[in-house]
Amino acid sequence: MKCVILAAGEGRRMRPLTYTRPKVMLPIANKPILEWNLLNAIKAGIKEFIFVIGYKSEMVREYFEDGKKWNVNIEYVNQGKPMGTAHAIGLVKSFVEDNFIVLCGDTIFGKDDIKRIAKNEMSMGLYEVEDAKEYGIVEMKENKIIKIHEKMKEPFSNVINAGIYHFTSKIFDFIEKTEISPRGEYEITDSINLFLREETMTGILMKEWKDVGYPWHLLDANEEILKKLESKIEGHVEENVTLNGNVIVGENSVIKSGSYIEGPVIIGDNCKIGPNCYIRPYTAIGNNCHVGNACEVKNSIIMDNSNVPHQNYVGDSIIGSNCNLGAGTKIANLRFDKKNIKVFLNGEKIDTKRRKLGAIIGDNVQTGINSMINVGAMIGNNVFIGPGAIAKGEIKPYARVM
């Protein structure tokens, strides 16, 4: 059986991080979201994969190639213009046999749930959430699906479409009958609703499911995955270093004297950490990074080739690739009134429902000495923040803050 993973979208709600990469390539615990799904599907016994790609597809191809690194086979289908999930699945018709499973590549599924879906023909994964307004609500009768209702203002249930399916080739007949939606796309949920008028489909409640809809959801997923990882030291740890809890240190990385690392923490390859820095739990530091003297990093994701080198504070933040914080740059992560932090994203004000959130910073951002970044700042790629400047709100790519 082949596993189709939908990985074509940009992920506009994940800006500014997706200005320079597809959503499925955003890192959690130093692996792309797409890789976590690949690994879990492999553990579920699947060896044949089809990635449906589109936006910045070369990044996916270059990273995964033909799948030999994972001892599997990966084929690629390029969607081209994004025209919806039904259109994407319809493109794989000639690549699959009668039974195949489909995963939305930007949601993380557990291996046991993938295995259960694979065993149940014409089934769909379900998940129970606290707030179902942003999802497709699934109407059920016993274990059979009656209809999927998209994004209701007043949901009648908290059971949602989890974005994982086991289809037979029958689904292609209904994809061909699917009309364009009000969003201007061909939606697989519309195809399934057409199918349900004539056939039956089983709903299976998922045990592990993590939706990554907005940038700050990466921090939640990062925490969950780091909790499950075990210590592994492949680099060099100098004397007078304290490692508490589970800490992973990659090849050729050096943890210099005076550093205090409180796990769970993951540090990639070829990093220089310290001396005299404090790295707090749920932090993921990518490859070729530098965290230097008198710096503190807490509950954050720092992507490859970025530096937090001199007297910096980074809390509850995401820093893209190839960034450099000038000496004394600090990122605020808590309002004075302790209320939820709201951000501006694509011009819309959004309640993150988090009391603590620092900055979401795109690739190639540089800050000058003693610059300051306010809570909830959304900073696009290739932005320059000058010495002593204060950055706040939504800052578009290539801007200058002086």
Image: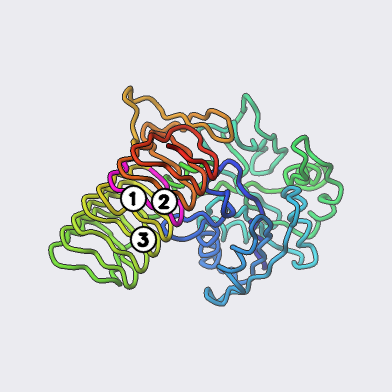
Residue beneath disc 3: 289
Q: Residue furthest top?
A: 337
User: Residue 325 in magenta?
Assistant: yes
Q: Label 1 vs label 3: CA separation?
A: 17 Å
Q: Height in image: 41 above or below 325?
A: below
Q: Position of residue 275 (x, y in %)?
A: 20, 59
Say which quadrant the N terminus sits in: bottom right
**Other-residue count near label 2 (Cα within 10 Å), few / some / many at <14 / 14–19 / ≥20:** many
The residue shown at (34%, 72%) is 251
Of residue 265 and residue 143, the one placed in the foreground of this image is 265
Q: How is the image coloured?
A: rainbow
**Other-residue count near label 3 (Cα within 10 Å), few / some / many at <14 / 14–19 / ≥20:** many
The residue shown at (69%, 42%) is 145
Instruction: Identify the main secondary structure in magenta.
Output: loop
Residue beneath disc 1: 282
Circles 2 and 1: CB distance less than 8 Å?
yes
Q: Height in image: 259 above or below 1?
A: above
Of residue 301 and residue 398, the one placed in the foreground of this image is 398
Q: Height in image: 133 above or below 241?
A: above
Q: Label 2 vs label 3: CA separation?
A: 18 Å
Q: Label 2 vs label 1: CA separation?
A: 7 Å
Circles 1 and 3: CB distance less than 8 Å?
no
Q: Position of residue 95 (x, y in %)?
A: 76, 68
User: Residue 96 in magenta?
Assistant: no
Residue beneath disc 2: 222
Q: Which residues are magenta?
A: 317-330
- Residue type at mark 1 is Tyr
